[in-house]
Image (tube, grey):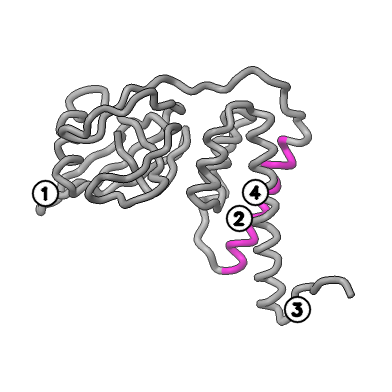
């Protein structure tokens, strides 16, 4: 297991720089096998040294590339596969270990195609707004799946969200609810972008009604 200060979602790409002895040991054990490991968010504490408070919902990842540098550090690229739930943490010996199980979506109402299309447009509009402000964003050439179950996770990986908001979405286990929460968070992000653009154009943000 790899507790981090960031959130990996299925379909997301995770670059890692591994230097702690315990994680170098983990990497040496992973590379000859299926190269899969779990990633969870650190809710409180630090990535280095141990003793952190960890989330119980995370993502199974697979190493796509691993290169060792001359100083013994590793540059790793992994991709999120599926969500997992931690059933029990084991002693961190020689590195974090846990018993986990898959955390699939529960059955629920289907997502209206028009609403889902609007959600994708909202993400693209938000990313375009950030580009106009000079921000670096994921490429707009990334294809988002037509399936809302996968597409909502892809959009979560691409969206400019805080780790804790991304974790909130990761923990939602019904597609309709996940799309609704994602839409709310994208709307909040768009409001901030609009305020920044108006401020940059010399306009004043609207004040409270008199």
Query: How many C-alpha atoms fall within 10 Å of the one at disc 1: few (<14), some, or many (≥20)?
Result: few
Residue 185 tag number: 4
Callout 4: 10 Å neighbours few (<14), some, many (20+)?
A: some
From where the camera sits, is residue 147 visible?
no
SS for tag 3? loop
Examine the rendered structure and indicate whether residue 43 appears above or below residue 78: below
Q: CA distance from mark 4 to mark 1?
A: 40 Å
Q: Which residue is mark 1?
A: 72
- Answer with left or right where residue 64 lies relative to residue 101: left
On screen, residue 101 versus residue 123, left or right, reads left
Residue tagged 2: 127
Q: Nearer the viewer, mark 4 or mark 1?
A: 4
At a point 69% along the width and 38% down the height, the residue shown is 180
Q: CA distance from mark 4 to mark 2?
A: 13 Å
Q: Quadrant of residue 61?
A: top left
Mark 4 vs 2: CB contact within 8 A? no
- Magenta-drawn stretch, dominant element (helix, strand or loop): helix
Q: CA distance from mark 3 to mark 1?
A: 53 Å
Q: Which residue is mark 3?
A: 204
- Name, please, the residue furthest toward the top: 107
Query: Which quadrant is the N terminus positioned in?
Result: top left
Q: Is residue 96 above or below residue 189?
A: above
Give the extent of the magenta segment.
116-133
Percent coordinates x, y for residue 176 in the rendering? 69, 29
């Amino acid at each position: 297991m790899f507790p981090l200060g960031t959130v990996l979602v299925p379909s997301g790409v995770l670059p890692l720089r591994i230097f702690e002895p315990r994680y170098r040991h983990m990497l040496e054990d992973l590379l000859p096998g299926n190269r899969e490991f779990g990633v969870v968010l650190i809710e409180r504490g630090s990535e280095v040294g141990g003793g952190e408070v960890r989330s119980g919902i995370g993502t199974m990842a697979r190493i796509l590339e691993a290169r060792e540098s001359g100083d013994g550090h590793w540059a790793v690229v992994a991709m999120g596969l599926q969500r997992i739930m931690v059933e029990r943490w084991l002693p961190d010996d020689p590195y974090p270990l846990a018993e986990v199980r898959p955390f699939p979506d529960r059955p629920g109402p289907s997502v209206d195609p028009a609403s889902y299309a609007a959600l994708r447009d909202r993400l693209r509009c938000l990313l375009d707004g950030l580009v106009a402000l000079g921000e670096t964003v994921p490429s707009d050439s990334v294809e988002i799946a037509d399936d809302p179950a996968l597409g909502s996770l892809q959009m979560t990986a691409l969206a400019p969200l805080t780790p804790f908001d991304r974790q909130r979405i990761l923990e939602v286990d019904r597609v309709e609810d996940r799309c609704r929460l994602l839409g709310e968070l994208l709307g909040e992000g768009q409001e901030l972008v609009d305020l920044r653009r108006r401020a940059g154009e010399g306009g004043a943000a609207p004040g409270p009604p008199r």
